[in-house]
Amino acid sequence: MMTTRIHALSTALLACGLAFPAVADWSIDGETSVLHFLSTKNAQVTEVHEFDSFEGSLSDSGKLSVAVDLASVNTAIDIRNERMQEMLFNVTKFAQATFEATLPDSMTNLQAGDVVNGKVDGILTLHGKAVPTSFSVQASRVSDDTLTVSTTAPTLIKAESFGLGEGVAALQKIAGLQSITTTVPVTFSVTFEQ
């Protein structure tokens, strides 16, 4: 009697598994993905920087969650990296920036070979402040298990919106600069794999 129940339960579970196949989240491939931002100092010198470490997931229903390790800021100058970590981002207190969004259906229902342009509206949390933020992107379903998403235009992030104005001023002073712009263009190109 017991083995019959176990067999019946196993059959029922297997049937449920076949009726509802497991849905796997998509994860950002850290090897092929990049996240850049630009800074301009003394009104005319613009430099490209990046974050070396970030991760993210995307559910089949379109829930996107990205976390950026702010200590991984890479400006190609060690002392500047350290100053940004300490004086701007305050990584001991605010280790990550996060972005949470729900992608539109047009981007989540792609078949292999499909490409679509659109806007992703979400909440960017940085330095303890959560601010509505939008990114204009192109999503491409490269294959059944690979999706790429890239910005089609930079998103402008305002330091003041995140309480970073004082940090920018401190960096400007310690570096002896006439100015550092407080609006920063951000771009990315990420690969999600399932």
Image: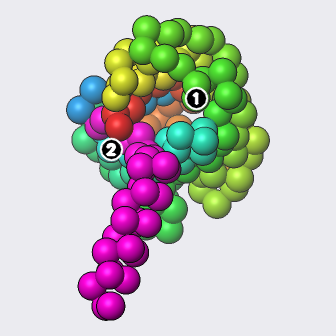
Q: CA distance from mark 2 to mark 1?
A: 25 Å
Is 82 on the left-hand or right-hand side of 186?
A: left
Q: Is residue 3 visible?
A: yes
Q: Quadrant of the N terminus?
A: bottom left
Q: Residues within 10 Å of mark 1 (few under 14, many from 20)?
A: some
Point out residue 26 in the picture as x, y percentages from the top left corner: 41, 40
The number of numbered discs placed on residues in the rendered structure image is: 2
Q: Quadrant of the C terminus?
A: top left
Q: Which mark is residue 177?
A: none
Residue lying at the far bottom of the rendered structure: 2
User: In the image, what residue type sits under mark 2?
Assistant: Ser
Q: Is 6 above or below relative to 135?
A: below
Query: Majority secondary structure of the magenta segment?
Result: helix
Point out residue 10 in the picture as x, y percentages from the top left corner: 34, 70
- Here the colouring is rainbow
Query: Circle 2 is placed at which residue position?
Result: 53
Disc with the residue nearer the chain's start (2 vs 1): 2
Query: Circle 1 is placed at which residue position?
Result: 108
**In the image, which is nearer the foreground, mark 2 or mark 1?**
1
Q: Secondary structure at mark 2?
A: loop
Say which residue appears at 31% left-offset and 91% top-offset: 2
Q: Nearer the viewer, residue 122 or 1?
A: 1
Residues drawn in magenta: 1-30
Say which residue appears at 51% left-offset and 62% top-offset: 94
